[in-house]
Amino acid sequence: MYHPEWQRRLLSAGIGLLLPLSPAIACGPDFPYLLLNDRQNALAQMPEGSFVQEIRKLGATIPGLGRASEATLQQYPGTNDRLPIQREEVEKSQLQDGLFERVQRLRALTEAAQVESQGAELPAELRLYTAGAVAFAQGDHWQAAEHFQRVLALPAEQRKLRSTWAAYSLGRSLALMSGEATDTNEPDLPQRAAAAFELTRQLAIEGFDDPLELALASLGEQARLYLHAGEWSQAIALYASQAIHGSETGTSSLREVGASLAALDDQHLRPLLHQQAVRQLLSAKLLAGIQHSSLPAERLLTLIQQTDIQQLDDADRLAAIAYREGNYASTQRFLDRATDSGLTWWLRAKMALRAGDSEAASQAYAEAAKGFPEDENWGWRRNGDWLNETLKPKCRIEGESAILALERGDYLQAFEQLYRGGDIYWQDAAAVAERVLTTDELKGYVDSQVASAPQPVDSEPWNYWDRPTAMRLRELLARRLMRDGRYDEARGYFAQAEQQQAAADYQQARERAQSAWTDIGRAEAYFEAASLLRRQGMELLGYELGPDNYVYAGNYPERYNSAQMISDAEPIETGGLLSAAEAQRWNATAAAPYRRFHYRWIAADLASSASDLLPERSQAFASTLCAATDWMINVDPQRAQSYYRRYVEQGALRLPPAPAFVFGVGACETPDFQAARKRQWIERGQAVRQVAYEHQGALTALSIAVVGVAIYWRRRAKKAVAKMKE
């Protein structure tokens, strides 16, 4: 027999043992920067630009010259040990029938004349180029240049393999000779070297073999000649072209050139700022957040304003640098001289916000978005609280504009602007779709703009993490409709057949729970719905963001964010850029309860509703409460305790022997609803017999009275018949 005090102690001890001893801390992915969680700062900050994107304005693409490949990326002539290995790999693939081995033996010689005599049987281009390479390796650049020129003098059909090699090596030889020359009779060596590098590119464009991509390397070598001559703009243009064609060497060289310029004192740097390329290179570094101790942003801005520059083509970039420095007076002065670029309008929007003119800011944002190409990408960066952001200026501008749209109540426009950002601002778009738009507003947009989910190319189901935003949005709507009880509408928005079937099964169970004729039938339906939610609740009812984080497949709890707007369980309050009307929408769409895996509470309540309809002395009653307790034990111990106490007080004490009540996955017994039906009939019969026993005297008297009345009416009927016969 159970004793109440013993029951309470057992209950407390059992639940206590099942609780975690300490909170678990899990590592998570790189979480994205959320504009809506950082509204004020998102509007105020000017993100860092892209150095790679900026230097594209300093050079030009060379028609016919290809993009850099692995050969260019691994090669840096004169300093990279990889170059000889690359050369050998190329020669081995080019030279067959023992030619490679013979060339290798010749390369081991120390005199060009020896190469010519011992390699007489080789094709002329191989013999002459190898002789020049040997002379170059020995430091005899004059003789090396002579042999490379002899290669280039051969008929075109006889130098298909070594033309670009010879022209490039000739340029390097002449460049080194210009540094060594003391004879004033050779003043044109730098010009001749530059011409050789230009020839290298021309030969590659004409189709001569260039497996080491020396044509691209020649841009950097020629730029180095210009640097030695103090011709900064020409050098910058060539390095920029090299970078535009995909060479990391060009990009890194421009960083070094910028550092060299920054190291100059004011007297030498100020006149160079008249050169647009010099000015733009320095502003590109600062705009991209590349700092140099000798050239802080304020120094560059001051020098430029002290210099009488008539045409300031990069005024928008300088305005952006001034804005990020908090120098708003200089920002406005540069904006007054800037053309109507996308960056100019972006800064005008921010300056309008500083002046408190939201309407002008919105108009400026609209113009700014037009000023940037869809594909312009400033790269990946860390933002506030160490969050990551891939910054596409057009998307970022639309995201900032969405903040203003929310403030003025244009919720659908705000969603559209964020949604156009794709994966970058998906969580911001999802927050508006899930918590700010009404279900009908969201459904209307999806029906008109996202009519169907894109299909994978290989016909395989989408990997969870690779789902397109269109599919994510449709699934978000499906789950929202399910939470609203609009089951018929919801099913079509699920992309996977498994989810559609689960939604249909859940709908049928919920409908049977309302329409079944018997209590046991309704209880069975309630428990079926509860079990479905416990197994597939995330897919059926989960919130994309808080509190369930379907966006991360439910693997992570809500992350900490300094603003904490999206992740707060408490009601959202009006403040800052969050209007009262928007806050009301957030609060109206919050999960109930606002707990991670909130659908587990719904599942437990459905299981409890099932128990309400079952005989308390049935195994099904105990099993449904066991399931509810099991589902809550680790997330809401107080609620779990209430379910367990009800089982003890209403079921276990009245059902000897009590069914097993062991927590853990699959530990609870499956409810036997058929046995519950039998138990219900047994209990009804017992109830009837109990009533009869308790009122047997009255029932006996009632029976006698009924019999007496029956006899009376029978006799009366007989008398009536007899009288009629008379």
Image (spheres, rainbow, N blue to C red):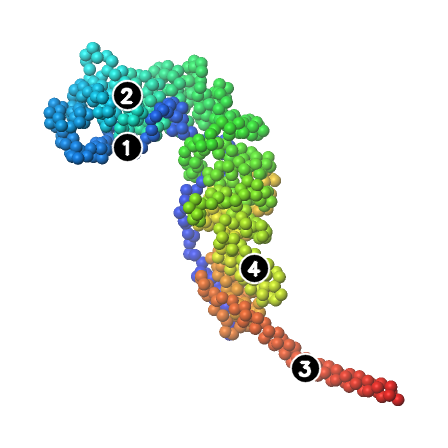
- Badge 1 local density, few (<14 within 10 Å), some, or many (20+)? some
Disc assigned to residue 696? 3
Vertically, is 185 above or below 160? above
Q: Label 4 to label 2, Cα distance in Å?
A: 79 Å
Circle 2 SS class: helix
Vertically, is 107 above or below 688? above
**Is the Cβ of the residue at disc 2 closer than 8 Å to that at disc 1?**
no
| Amino acid type at image mark 4 | Ala
Mark 3 or mark 2: which comes first in sequence?
2
Q: Percent x, y for residue 425?
A: 48, 39
Instruction: Tell which tag, 3 or 2, sits nearer the viewer.
Output: 2
Depth check: give the residue in front, 714 or 95. 95
Instruction: Tell which tag, 3 or 4, sits nearer the viewer.
Output: 4
Instruction: Tell which tag, 4 or 2, sits nearer the viewer.
Output: 2
Q: Name the residue that disc number 1 marks.
A: 71
Is 439 placed left or right of 99 in the picture? right
Q: Which corner quadrant of the image does residue 277 belong to?
A: top left
Viewport quadrant of the C terminus: bottom right
